[in-house]
Amino acid sequence: MLMLELSKEDLEKLVKLQEIDSKIIKLELKLKELPEEIKRFEEIAQTRRNKIARIDERIEELSQRRKELERIINESYKKIEESKKKKAQAKNLEDYKEAIKLKAEAEKGIIKATKEIEQILKELNQLFREREKMESSVAEFEKKIARKEEEIQKTKKMLERKLRELGGLREQLVSEISPEVVEFYEEKKYEFGGNVFVPVYNKTCSGCSMQVPSAQYTKLLRGEGLVYCPNCGRILFIEDGNRG
């Protein structure tokens, strides 16, 4: 691991660099999360579109069944007319009974089919109302998605602008620090997966919440070189206004 002594000026610049890097990471995370907001709205809208599709399938199924029942009713009326002719032309008791039976079966079929059509019409009425609500809901969600996309585009442009600004500040700051010191910072940043420099509050490391030993705290106060937290290994510093 690369080790070196840092001047007070170097330390101050690296802390500023760390602050910039932290802001950049947060902005990049926000940019990454933006599409997820739209995705959530689209998933809800798609769920409702799928429900409309299922309703349409059921409506088609019921409509076909209704046509079939209407065909059965028409056929039954034809059979009733046929039974009247057979009844009038009956030459014996068997023919007469056969005509009566044909009429009774046709009438029974009409009653049964009519009742089923009534149930179908009730269900269709309910499905059409439900479909209308779903269509209205999907239309509203699509409006929300359009508005959200517009908001996100504005937010995206604003975040990208801030990232460019921070990138410029970072580049300027890095140019003011020696390559060896920047390399030291980058290595430490990779090692800790985040903040390298952490402030001390009430003699406590803000990186791991462990108490800083008195000797190291005194060294911090005096500004005698780098002071590492004995627990987490991060580099400690005291912010202006928190000395004493």
Image (cartoon, rainbow, N blue to C red):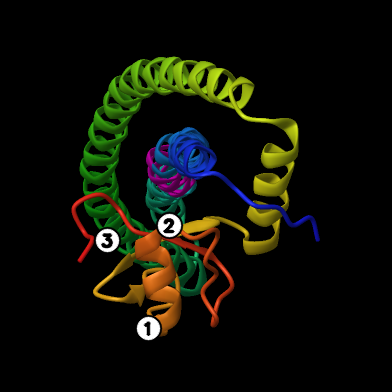
Q: Nearer the viewer, residue 21 or 211?
A: 211
Q: The residue under label 1 is which amino acid type?
A: Ser
Compared across the picture, whether 68 is left or right of 80 comes to right
Residue sitting at x 37%, y 24%: 152
Q: Can you see residue 103? A: no
Residue 187's x, y, as percent?
73, 52
Q: CA distance from mark 1 to mark 2?
A: 14 Å
The residue that disc 1 covers is 214
Dot placed on the residue nearer the N-terminal end, 1 or 3: 3
Residue 49's x, y, as percent?
43, 39
Dot placed on the residue nearer the N-terminal end, 2 or 3: 3
Helix, strand or loop status at disc 3? helix
Q: CA distance from mark 1 to mark 3?
A: 92 Å
Q: Nearer the viewer, residue 109 or 101?
A: 109
The residue that disc 3 covers is 115
The number of callouts visible is 3
- The quarter holding residue 26 reads top left
The residue that disc 2 covers is 223
Residue sitting at x 32%, y 34%: 138
Q: CA distance from mark 2 to mark 3?
A: 94 Å
Mark 3 residue crowding within 10 angstroms, few (<14) / some (14–19) / many (20+): few
Residue sitting at x 20%, y 66%: 244
Magenta-tinted stretch: 41-58
- The quarter holding residue 142 reads top left
